[in-house]
Image (tube, helix red, strand yellow):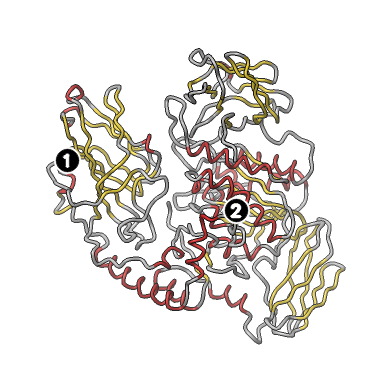
Amino acid sequence: MTARNISIDADARVARVARRCGIGIFASAWLLAAGAAGADIRLPRLVGDNMVLQRDAPLKLWGWADPGERIQMRFRNQLRRTTADAGGAWSVTLAAVSAGGPYQMQLIGKHAVTLHNILVGDVWLASGQSNMEFPLRRQGGFGGVNNAEHEVSGAYFPRLRLLLVNKETALKPKSDVTSQGWQAVIPATAANFSAVAYLFGRELQQRYRVPIGLIESSWGGTPAESWTSDLGLQRLPYFAASIERRSLIDARALADYDQYLASRNDWYRLHGREDRGRVDGQDLWAAAPYQAIDWPTTTEPQPWPLKTTKDFDGTMWYRKTLDIPESLAGSPLRLHLTSLLQADTTYFNGSRVGTTTGEIAERDYPVPAQLVQPGSNVITVRISGEYASGDGYVGMLGEAADLYAQIGSETLPLAGTWSYQAGPDVTALPDPPPLAEFMSRYPQAPALLYNAMIAPLTGYRIKGVIWYQGEANANRAVQYRVLFPAMIRDWRSHWGYEFPFLFVQLAGFGRQKPQPADYPWAELREAQAAALALPHTGMAVAIDIGNASDIHPKNKQDVAHRLVLAAELAAYSEHIVASGPSYRSMQIEGNRIRLNFAGIGSGLELKDPRDGVRGFSIAGDDAHFVWARARLEGNEVLVSADAVSAPVAVRYDWGNTPDGNLYNREGLPAAPFRTDAPRH
């Protein structure tokens, strides 16, 4: 996880808090929305030079002025007049305009304002977490698509416009976003913009020859509930307690948080990088004889980073005892660790066996045979966190099956209870107050991002939304099955119409187990696909263009193209094959199962057919899945296995990074599925 700067919109107290902890509050944006008396006509960041207005639909435009000030707007051959209300707010609605431009817009109040280089076309909102945020060119160790320099150097599209919403959180809905405003596409603007959004917009502009406006509002590592309004979450009881806590925030809570930040930052300055486990170059806490009997314990790995020990995020030591049978002692061993935040040094019986920097880097450390003793062996992992003054995380991330020791043919699990201890003495580190939940650099609390980064956009007419998110909810698939469609409905209700909502299904990421198994990411993909039951939705399947060792795959070109196909169907009413095969029904035929599919286009085919059909598993009543044989029979698939004489269920591409090869002849992959899906 890379460091992020945020703004928290509440009041002047919050601004002072933010300055003290290095969080940027954009006071000018706040003043725009607040409406200071005597100022000129003020416009939201969405309305300005270079903007793209949605074609063929009524257009609401708004701003602020002095209370009672008369405002006149002229655009093309339309003239609108209005008067600012008692709070200084005003709005007008223009009749639908066809695609074209560039145009000017004049606004006259006590002063005159002229907006230049306006286009009319299609406006798309791009939102989600890090795979939507992923920029076209690598920035600070993050982003960079395949052939990035070629993509960036060719980015000259004057009729493609970009607006990047700055990262902010807010306790209540805001009236404006923080942004540099609309910019035409040149290499410098495209390079820092969402790769998926830019490539999507570029293809649409070339396909339909109309101006395209892209609004990016994204934030890595954030869950769907943070992007959903309080109203949209009302029927989801899981989030009620957090929403209630936020409603109780008052001036006293803000003052307490101000004091906490000052004390916390002072402590980090004085003690944050101390390490009692490493003294004079000696790693005392890694030594096998060291007794960690008074250390607290935790369960590792975690599906999502947990803040423990007063939110301390510097150096943390972890220890675990591994019992080695007499028969395996003296044999070489390999330690496989999950993702670690952020760098580690790992020891086996006091000897250093590996060190790695980077959250998602592969950690597979060889342990020499002479270190492997019969009976108890001590594994120690020293993790260096972010040292972000309590705003970061430290720990082990991933699935239990990915944390293990391999010795010969034996796999010894390491998941479970680990002892841990912070490097410095954290006794004097102040405890975070309740408000800290809502002030994180990695927002997790409900509605914080909706309030700051979506609510101010809801008055602006859009063609539709593209969405790439789910990783942060991957271990809550059952909840996501309800939350995700609730968020879609919520956004549509705030905009006031049922715009197309297109989303990317999670790409392949993470290790595959040798035998069929259950996977949280597979369940999350299933929950995503369930949202297709809502009207005017579309899904881009990305299971085949992921990367087992990188949660941010670089092939965003195919992701964007598949979103364009979904848009052609859902937003532009084209009669095309927009997606690959999807499971429709099955028939049990003795010892085999026949599968029928929708979305077959001009027919099913195998990509790389040398090894036959890959990716299928099958089970009987015992629900024990085994790898299956499968073959195409026309546009159906027959699945069977010698070990399953009475099959009842089939799964396809059910895993982290599976290798299924079922496509349609249009070159689009089959979506992962299971016929034994629970009914909700």
Q: Residue furthest right?
A: 77
Which residue lies at the image location 69% right of the left edge and 25% below the top edge?
Answer: 665
Q: Nearer the viewer, residue 56 or 456?
A: 456
Which residue lies at the image location 48% right of the left edge and 59% below the top edge?
Answer: 443
- Which label's residue is closer to the chain start, 1 or 2? 2
What amino acid is labelled 1 in the image?
Gly
- Image side of residue 679 versus residue 106, left or right: left
Q: Nearer the viewer, residue 70 or 228?
A: 228
Task: Mark 1: give few (<14), some (14-19) or many (20+) Cα within 10 Å.
Answer: many
> How many labels, in total?
2
Q: Which residue is mark 1?
A: 350
Which residue lies at the image location 82% right of the left edge and 69% below the top edge?
Answer: 75
Q: Secondary structure at mark 1?
A: loop
Which residue lies at the image location 37% right of the left edge and 38% below the top edge?
Answer: 400
- Image side of residue 13 versus residue 416, left or right: right
Q: Quadrant of residue 601?
A: top right
In the rendered view, would you say 103 is above or below 199?
below
- Image side of residue 660 versus residue 291, left or right: right
- Image side of residue 640 versus residue 495, left or right: left
Residue 477, percent from left and from top? 52, 43
Residue 616, percent from left and from top? 55, 23
What amino acid is labelled 2 in the image?
Ser
Q: Residue furthest front?
A: 621
Q: Secondary structure at mark 2?
A: strand
Q: Which residue is mark 2?
A: 127
Q: Quadrant of the C terminus?
A: top right
Residue 138, percent from left and from top? 50, 49
Q: CA distance from mark 1 to mark 2?
A: 47 Å
Task: Mark 2: give few (<14), some (14-19) or many (20+) Cα within 10 Å.
Answer: many
Q: Is residue 580 visible?
A: yes
Residue 379, percent from left and from top? 23, 39
Task: Check residue 76 in the rendering and tell me which mark sits there, or answer none.
Answer: none
